Image: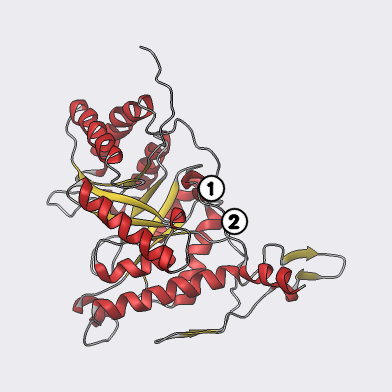
């Protein structure tokens, strides 16, 4: 079989490690860290860009960020993107935790910004009511903003470890954030050095309108749940236009169509490759985030059935181009805002 010339722009591919709740799923599987290690390694064999793991205060299961911190040293390339809610958590702690995942994974961390909008979650923290979605996402945008500022609060070369003088850091390269939002304030600086990626990848499910402006302002990756390529393409165009209006380069916001998948055979896996190729040709997005019915079964069929077909059609790369998640996604490492300001003023 002749090998086609690969002139097409490859699509990005991400996979959710958590499936929808269903009767019969073994509790030992949900709570077993080796289950997630096996899945992440399988995704890595398929050269997928990253895996996601959902989380909320209202569902049983382990903390997504902690699980992927466990997965990080057992994998070497695949990106790791847990959901972290911003509603009942401290922004400083969120920033530090995601930063730590980036260090543990050596530059493969991301973060899906989530909000907690149910009364049950509010009651867990002694609050009577959940705030409206608009207010929750406004706060989420502020948390994403301050997290990026905290990651920048150490310049890349702030840590000097000068044993001769006994100096660990260059204090002139640590910066106070002094952020004051509508519901919280943060001074900083961070207690951890700048992450390997400069700023870990920020992802937002931008399907709902209240989340869309946050995605346009702060996200590197936006997920859009759509039932047809035209709807996904329209959402992508809307997000790019919003990003442009905010002064961002829209090419630095990747939009992935988020699709449910359920595969039972190799035939289904080839059919999925056909569907992804058709959606990609129709401009549905920069790639796909797949949400499986059964993560173990569907990921195995995806990696051994769908991925080879996509690679043969030049729609998916055959190897990782670098070591960090930003390199997988073709996104540049952000410059440190304080170092940049110093250069301008000097």
Q: Residue at x 22, y 88 (%)?
A: 128
The number of callouts visible is 2
Quarter holding the N terminus is top left
Q: Residue 104 has which mark?
A: none
* 280 lies left or right of 252: left
**Residue 153, can we see it?**
yes
309 or 194: which is nearer to us?
309
Q: Secondary structure at mark 2?
A: loop
State the image coordinates of residue 346 (x, y, percent, origin top left).
77, 72
State the image coordinates of residue 268 (x, y, percent, origin top left).
18, 31
**Quarter-wise, where is residue 345 in the image?**
bottom right
Whichever of labels 2 and 1 marks the residue nearer the N terminus, that label is 2
Q: Residue 196 has which mark?
A: 2
Above or below residue 199? Residue 77 is: above
State the image coordinates of residue 131 (x, y, percent, origin top left).
25, 82
**Residue 84, can we see it?**
no
How far is mark 2 from mark 1, CA to CA? 8 Å
Above or below residue 240? Residue 44 is: above
Q: Residue at x 21, y 52 (%)?
A: 231
Residues at discs 2 and 1 in contact (Cβ within 8 Å):
yes
Give the residue number, with chain letter if any, for mark 1: 324
**Quarter-wise, where is residue 287 in the image?**
top left
State the image coordinates of residue 157 (x, y, percent, origin top left).
72, 63
């Amino acid at each position: 079989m002749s090998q086609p010339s690969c002139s097409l722009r490859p699509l990005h591919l991400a996979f959710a490690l958590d499936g929808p709740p269903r009767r019969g799923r073994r509790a030992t599987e949900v709570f077993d860290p080796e289950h997630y290690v096996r899945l992440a390694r399988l995704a890595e064999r398929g050269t997928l860009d990253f895996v996601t793991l959902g989380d909320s205060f209202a569902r049983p299961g382990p903390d997504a960020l902690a699980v992927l911190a466990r997965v990080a040293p057992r994998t070497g390339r695949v990106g790791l993107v847990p959901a972290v809610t911003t509603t009942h958590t401290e922004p400083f702690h969120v920033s530090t935790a995601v930063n730590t995942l980036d260090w543990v994974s050596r530059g493969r961390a991301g973060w899906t910004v989530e909000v907690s909008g149910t009364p049950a979650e509010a009651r867990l923290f002694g609050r009577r009511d959940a705030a409206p979605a608009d207010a929750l996402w406004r706060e989420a945008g502020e948390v994403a903003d301050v997290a990026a500022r905290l990651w920048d609060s150490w310049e890349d070369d702030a840590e000097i470890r000068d044993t001769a003088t006994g100096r660990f850091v260059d204090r002139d390269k640590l910066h106070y954030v002094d952020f004051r939002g509508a519901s919280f304030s943060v001074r900083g600086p961070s207690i951890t050095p700048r992450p390997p990626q400069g700023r870990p990848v920020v992802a937002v499910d931008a399907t709902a309108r209240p989340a869309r402006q946050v995605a346009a302002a702060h996200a590197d990756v936006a997920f859009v749940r759509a039932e047809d390529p035209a709807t996904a393409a329209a959402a992508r165009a809307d997000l790019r236009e919003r990003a442009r209006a905010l002064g961002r380069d829209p090419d630095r916001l990747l939009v992935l169509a988020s699709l449910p998948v359920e595969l039972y055979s190799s035939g289904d896996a080839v059919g999925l490759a056909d569907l992804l190729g058709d959606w990609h040709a129709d401009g549905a997005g920069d790639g796909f985030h797949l949400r499986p019915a059964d993560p173990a079964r569907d990921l195995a069929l995806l990696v051994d059935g769908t991925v080879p077909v996509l690679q043969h059609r030049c729609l998916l790369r055959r190897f990782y181009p670098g070591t960090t998640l930003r390199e997988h996604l073709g996104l540049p490492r952000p410059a440190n805002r304080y170092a940049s300001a110093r250069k301008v003023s000097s």
